Amino acid sequence: MSDFIYLLGKMLVKVYSRIILRTRIIGVENIPAEGPVVIMSNHISLLDPPLIGAAIPRKVHYMAKEELFKNPLIAWVLKQLGAFPVKRGSGDTKAFKQALRILRSGGVLGVFPEGTRHPEGKLGKPHGGSAAIALRGGARIVPAAVKNIKTRGRPVVIFGKPLDISREGRISREERYEIAEEIMAEIASLLEAVEEQS
C-alpha cells in the first residue's frame, strides 16, 4: 500500500514539477543506483522534499518535524510517503536509529543539514548530526541544491557527484561539523554553477 501511495505521489509531483513549474533537473546520473545514500540539500521551501524525491528513480526517506505528525491523517500520509518524525533540537535518538535502519538496509535518506528553511540565497550553518548519520550508516553523500523555488526564474534541482566521507576510527564532534561544512561548501558550489548557467 505504501509503495503504491509513494509512486502515485511521485507521479503527481513529477507532473506538477515538469508541466506547471517547468523544473530543470540536473545531475540525476550522479545518484548511485544502489547502496546507502544520503542526499544533502539546502532548504528553502516545503516543496524541496517532494521535488528532490520526484527527480530521482530511488525512494527517498525524509525526517519531518514532529509537529506535522499531530494530525492523524497527515501523519498517515507522511508515513506512506516514507517520512518519519524527528524532535528538532533535542538529539532525537529514535529518529537517528530510524535513519540508520534505512541506510543499513541500502536505502536513500534525504537530509537538510541546515535543520530548517532559510531564505533563498542564504545558506545556514549546518548541524554535525547530518554528517554523523551518513558516517554511521556507511553511506555516500550526494550534495544537492534547489533554486528559484520561491523566487522568479525557472526552478532548478541539481545533484552533485557522490562524496565518500568515510573515516578511520572514532570521529569527534568537531570533525563531524567540519564534514558538514565541507558538504555545505559543495552545495554552495552547485548553486553558483546554476547561477552561471542562468
Image (cartoon, rainbow, N blue to C red):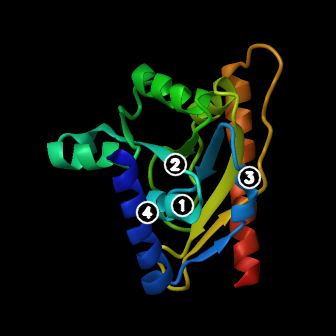
Q: Position of residue 171 (x, y in %)?
A: 73, 19
Q: Mark 4 points at which residue?
A: 10
Q: Which numbered dot is residue 126?
A: none
Q: SS class of the residue under badge 3?
A: helix
Q: SS class of the residue under badge 2?
A: strand
Mark closest to the chain's N terminus, 3 or 1: 1
The amino acid beneath tag 2 is: Val
The amino acid beneath tag 1 is: Ile
Q: Mark 3 points at which residue?
A: 185
The amino acid beneath tag 3 is: Ala
Mark closest to the chain's N terminus, 3 or 2: 2
Q: Which numbered dot is residue 60?
A: 2
Q: Which residue, as the protein is rendered here, is positioned at the far top?
A: 169
Q: Do the residues labelled 2 and 1 touch (CB within 8 Å)?
A: yes
Give whichever of 63, 113 is nearer the camera.
Answer: 63
Q: Distance between the residues labelled 1 and 4?
A: 10 Å
Q: Distance between the residues labelled 3 and 2?
A: 23 Å
Mark closest to the chain's N terminus, 2 or 4: 4
Q: Which residue is drawn at 44% across and 61% down?
A: 50
Q: Mark 1 points at which residue?
A: 52
